[in-house]
Image: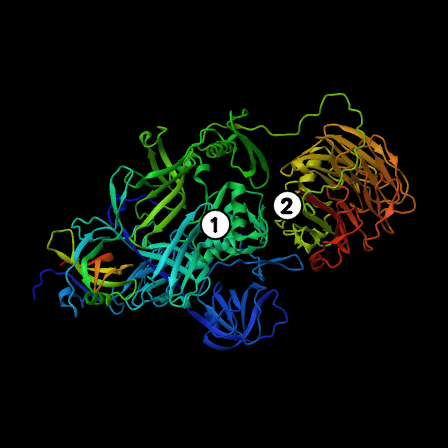
Amino acid sequence: MARAATAAELASFRSDGQYSRLRLAIIKPAPVFQAQVNQAFTTADKITEITYNNVTAGAYADIIDGMTVWIGSTSGAQDIGRARIRKAATSAKIYIGEESELDLENDQYITVVAEFGLWPRHIYVAATGTAYMDYDLAYSDQHNTMNPVPVMGPHAVAEYDGTLGGANTIDTEWDASDSWVLGSTISGYSWSAPGGNITDGSTATPTISFDAPGTYLVSCTVTAANGKTTTGYRYARIFDNTDTPITQFSLGRCEGSIDAGGWEFEVTLHDDADIDDVYDQALVILFGRDFYGNDESHTGDRDEISIGPIVDRENIIAIGWIAEETLAINPSEGAARFDVRGPQAWLKSMTGFPGGQFNSTSAPAAWTDFEDLTVDKALFNFIYWRSTAAIAIDCRKTGDTRLAALLEYGTGDLWSQMVELTTPTILAAPACDRYGRLFVEIDTQFLAIASRSGIPTVMTLTKLDREQAVDVERITTPDVSQISISGVSYDGLTGAAIFSLAPGHVFKHFGRIEAMDRLLMEDQTGANTLAAAIIARRNNEWPYWRMNLQQNNRLIDITPRQYLAASLDETENPRGVSFSGNLIPRVVTLDHDAKTRMLSTSIEAEAETIPGLSVTGTIPDSPPPPSYPPLPGMPDLPAFPSWPGRPGTQIRYVVILDDTEGIWFTDEFDELSPRWWSMNGGLTAAQRAALNEVHISRTGKIYSLNTALGVYYGAVGKGTLQIRYGAAWLAAQMVAAGQNPANPDKFWTIGLRSQTDTIALLAGKNVLYDSVIYPFYGTINSLVRKTTTTEIDRGASLTYGGNKWIATGTEGFGFDRKLTRWTYNFGTREAFSSLGAGGTLTYYHHARAGITAKLYAFGADICDYTDDNGVFITDKAPSGFTLNQGRKNLGCDPTGQYLMAQTSAATKRSSDYAATWGAISSLAAGTWSFICAANKDRWVAASGVGVMYTDDFGDSWTDKTGNLLDFIPSPVILDMAILTG
Amino acid sequence: MTYPLEIEIGATAETMENLQDLTVPVVYPKDLFTPWSENIELADGSKRGAGAPMAVWTWATISQAERDQLREFCTGASSTVYIKTSTNDDADTRRIYQATMIWPAGEDIDFTHRRDFTIQFRNLVLQEEA
């Protein structure tokens, strides 16, 4: 944690003649096992194990989960690539994290080194739907009795003045007392450091001494009271006068930024610094011998002392791994500049599969479940099971205890996944300090004042600490006039929506309105405080300070939370404004002047803001229905011309529902060969095969329905679905509505108002000739049963448009076809019309024009048309062919003039409101579903053949199947949805 | 032996020699010592000395042979040496420092001599009391 500077340290910061002699330790881990590949590979894809022989060093029993494997064309090389050991080796095989980038061949060289880096762990979903972690680790109790997370401090580096050996030893101090475990307590520590001498090795704070220079691997096995253990690993790099650190280098930019999430620095090494011994992605420790003044004799004598926030790591300036290098090619003297980056940069460069956690009301039984789910539990899953962060670096939890029904993250880099997990929910964010320690904290500005009392003030900045020049930005006109936040207070079973406004229902004089939703809330009071804190931060009067501190001050960092007290005199600026308060460091830069050896600190900061006014918000709703007399019917609009503007399909997502493989989506529809991703995480094979329909909202939320199990919900890209309204909920609703519990319940269909993420559900009793179906209306967090019933049950479609909800379907087990229309909030059932009779239909869906009152309801051999939202029905039954009955076997454009249809014999299109039909000859034979992509020319079609796109109303088609058939060899499209724009 | 001035130089602390004892004796320079490298102005108008101590040896003129003698201690742009040089204690006290010897980037050649020849010693680290 951060801490306040002592009086002696302040005196040192303010002394003359400070300088630092910089050092560099580049860690080269020791090999623990060497052998050769003993296997011919037919593919490089999805490699998880390697058979070996010809062991030349070490024993397979020395290989530890988390170590790094180098594969090379020569002994000890890594030119073929690197991988991570994922579990204990056997006498014939090593097991690695799943890889597709190693071009493995027989007889290549294997070197396992004692390096524990940052790696993603992938989740593997078997054909049965069962998820395994790290390829083959089945879920047992990992989310019920959780492993401890060792927090053992940064690597150590020490320099002995003289020659180590005999009585000449050097001590390093270690501290794992901040280790933590969810749901239990830490009960023991066991330290190991081969080559070192450990004192108090079963305590949290041992001393490890060394009598020879070298690189030592220090491990700490932390035991929890629940019986689980975890071992963390760090290095101790020891130097003496026979093994000296690199000193012939220059330090370039060395900066930590809260926006970047951590620290990076540049070092330039010259030929005489063993450049050729530096391997890619090597761990680099930048440290210094620091000297401060108090030179009363004026002889240049200095006190050698390093000042930092961590005991016995004060000499460390920054830690990271080599990311990039720039080589200066020079015949007389070569140089190499290395960019060294902290954990945040590496986590940003590693792609992880999507994931998510659901709340469970009982002991969790799968990798996707936690009982009493919190952000910290999801974070634990992420750092411990989805990556190796927990053993390689210090990871701190948020401490937040708010419950959540679902926490999820989409495909992306590990860092953004962590941000997605923590920021939209509790306004926390990950950040790494100079040592590479990961903190996930709620920003100071979003904390209630009472919660800020423990934040240390590192020091009070006086005029003795800085140059005269200070850049200060002062904002006198509010940027935000009103902030509206909403979220859910979840108790583990049900959620209560909470709304809050700041400063109140009336806007500030200046600024724009901002909204923030889907937050996790504790209660209304907390929400109001949060709203006040957010608007105060948005309108920060002093959002930017920049100043050079003329001192070697390494107590200040961008994380963990800390203050700098500061003031500004009115005499210091021409405007005569003054300031006195706390600053929060956002950027910290360390500059080293090679000429003077002065290491000086500069900071960029923002002033702390104090929450002001806020009130409980009003639950938003759609506007009330107008009281005006009915408007005359609108004339038909002309067909929209093609938009010649932006290139590409203008389609952000295409989502399909297959009859057995569930929901799949692509966000690369503009690519020649789009990649398709599964949205079925959290579902069994039976569950995904039972989904009946799919919808996508303007905000990218996926809604689906299983007629027996209920409503499923997820965010596109996150790969997981969660059931939100299930059988128990419906049963309770039916009891509350006075229905006979003996009659079976059933979910019939859902509809979506895309722009507002408002949904409607038709569900109720499934009784022959006597079904009672209720509409439920609201959001995914709060569905309210309405009193207006309908008789429509099976095969229904429900859509929103023109401020009306319309359902079509059959009544009484398919003998009558009906259309029902409701007002926007299901307050009134406005129409209940009979549709055409005849045929042998089972389903009766509809295609609805987006901007007119036109609707086509279709069955096997009928097609009923209305141009007034169902008041007057006319028969558009096409002659000579029979329409298929899938949900999207008929599609129309937003005007209703252009249609595409799948008949029993061919694909058809119409450009005159279904009056006449022509063949779509350019599509291969199949059972096609159609959906119009915003205008008459752009359509997406999907079938067992694949997915196609046209931008000329079906004259020509482009294949967008991509890799879909790799996952679903013979798709049967039940439904599809797209999101344009 | 008693020297007029105790100004010394060597590749190591043990091999330091008075400038007059070098293979080619070198005349004593004007030696300037500053306990820090530069002054920085603070917000209250005061100054802070920043950086390591430094020393500067200056000769108004120095012969080619003397110059070459000094060059043996610094064959490149800089080197690590040990010197005994003035401090600001008083006029007669000199102390031993480890230093980075900076060879002048340009030399003003005047026939067989150099004029205004200046060598900087940066990053002085006090070794022991004189």
- SS assignment at label 1: loop
Q: Mark 2 sits on what residue?
A: A714
- SS assignment at label 2: strand
At x 37%, y 28%, the residue is A575
Query: Are tags 2 and 1 found on a single chain?
Result: yes
Task: Name the amino acid type tagged 1.
Answer: Leu
**Image height of A520 relative to A902, above or below:** above
**Location of the C terminus of chain A (image quadrant):** top right
Q: Position of residue A491 (x, y in %)?
A: 55, 39
Q: Which label lies toward us, 2 or 1? A: 2
Give the residue at the far front of this rendering. Answer: B111
- Front residue of A746 and A172: A172
Q: Position of residue A4 (x, y in %)?
A: 32, 43
Gap in angstroms between the C-alphas marked 2 and 1:
27 Å
At x 57%, y 64%, the residue is A99
Q: Quadrant of residue A838?
A: top right
Q: Position of residue A566 (x, y in %)?
A: 34, 36
Give the residue at the far left of this rendering. Answer: B2
- Front residue of A604 and A644: A644
Task: Name the amino acid type tagged 2.
Answer: Gly
Mark sitting on residue A182:
1
- Front residue of A190 and A211: A211
| Chain at tag 1 | A
Of the image marks 2 and 1, the number of the one nearer the N terminus? 1
Indicate left or right for A455 with A83 as reference. Answer: left
Q: Is residue B53 visible?
A: yes
Give the residue at the far right of this rendering. Answer: A880
